[in-house]
Image: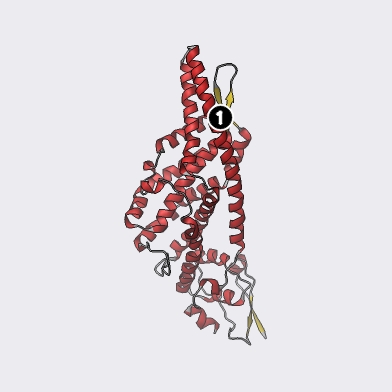
Amino acid sequence: MYTYVRQPEKEKKAGFTGYMVDEASTIKSYQYNNIYRSKAFQEAMNYFDITDDMTRGILLTVNEADQNAVMVSLSNKLYKHIVDKIDDIDFGTLPQSKGDITKIENYEEMVDCLNVINDILVNYNQPTGPVDTVRTAINNMVDRTSTFTRAYEMNVEMPIIIYNTIVLAIVSSVSYLISTTIEFIKLPQDQGYEIALDKNAAMKTNSHLLYKDLEKFNKSCANGELDKMLEFVMKQNASNFGGETLMFGAMYTAAALGVIILIIPVIRELIFFFYYIRAKLSDYFDAQSTILTMNAYNIENNLTRDSKTRKDIAKKQKNIAEKFKKISNFFKIQYKSAEKKTTDNVKKLDKEKYKASDILDSTPDSATAALF
């Protein structure tokens, strides 16, 4: 015999229409209408397999305290996807900046690159959206220097991973924008090369996962959620993830866990992308170096009237253009391949729904009292 338990409107909106409870088994019917569920917990429920009776029963009957316990276990499960691949990511010298983005290798050159690209976009009457996104991300990292440097001092793992991943995304996005949208076009005779823009490529840039993830990061900074979560993690001083030790513990609040569950997919996607692109930090800086060098030669060329000097500059520009072509081709192929593999793997993970037994070591006390 089965009893069908109807659900209130709030649960219907979350995708639940009721559940079947087998009264012949140990699970009993339960009225859960009055149980409070935080917004964060309702978001977390999307990761679970609600077609499984036991899982659904636990999710609908746990009290507020045990809801946090469920989110803690889920956060650790999701975080493991990042930890499993983090050692295979080449962050180069970025960790040496220890939380201060202005101290990364070639920081000033990267900012100069953004200025050059911005001027080119404006000159071609194109939106500066991608540049604005990256600039905002840089400013957000600068504004949180004290938080990230403190994370390094205290050796708190999660903020450190967020810092390195976002900074690498910033560096990578600048190089991607250069390699896919900028062209060096040879001028007649010995006039050298001009820097041009591939308008079609520039229009498509906003849809690339690098920029979409940086936009999500910027949003979490703008609404203050990231700051609250980072401060909470710092206070918990959770720095010993590994083996049987959990990154997130029982003292975490629903609000902090909610932000963690939202930010992990962003970092996870970026980690997957960098895992598949297999590029070195120097590769990104090579792309940035070519446009700065070419821009410098163009300025020099415009200032000189000497024909011999112009010929020498044109010869140097040709070498830069040939080098840039190789770099550009590498990035176009690698970025496209890495993005596809990342998207496929993330979709596969997102489709995977967890049963309670995949996440929890035991049934929470409040669910036990309600169901058995």
The image quadrant where one finds the C terminus is: bottom right
Q: Residue furthest bottom?
A: 24
- Give whichever of 72, 297 is nearer the camera: 297
Q: Amino acid under label 1? A: Glu
Q: Residue at x 54, y 40 (%)?
A: 176
- Give whichever of 244, 50 is nearer the camera: 244
| Left or right: 30, with 253 as reference point | right
- Give whichever of 40, 217 is nearer the camera: 217
The image quadrant where one finds the N terminus is: bottom right
Tell me where residue 188 sits by quadrant.
Answer: top right
Q: Position of residue 68 (x, y in %)?
A: 46, 69
Q: Position of residue 186 (x, y in %)?
A: 59, 23
| Left or right: 26, with 237 as reference point | right
Q: Is residue 268 above or below residue 97?
A: below
| Left or right: 260, with 197 as reference point | left
Q: Residue at x 47, y 33 (%)?
A: 289
Tell me where residue 187 sits by quadrant.
Answer: top right
Kind of element beneath mark 1: helix
Q: Residue furthest left?
A: 153
Q: Residue at x 51, y 60 (%)?
A: 81
Query: Counting other residues with Cα less than 10 Å from the Cα at mark 1, is it few (<14), some (14-19), or many (20 or more)?
Result: few
Q: Residue furthest right?
A: 1
Residue 51 seen in the figure: yes
Q: Which residue is mark 1?
A: 322
Q: Position of residue 257 (x, y in %)?
A: 46, 63
Q: Residue at x 41, y 68 (%)?
A: 245
Q: Is residue 293 above or below residue 328?
A: above
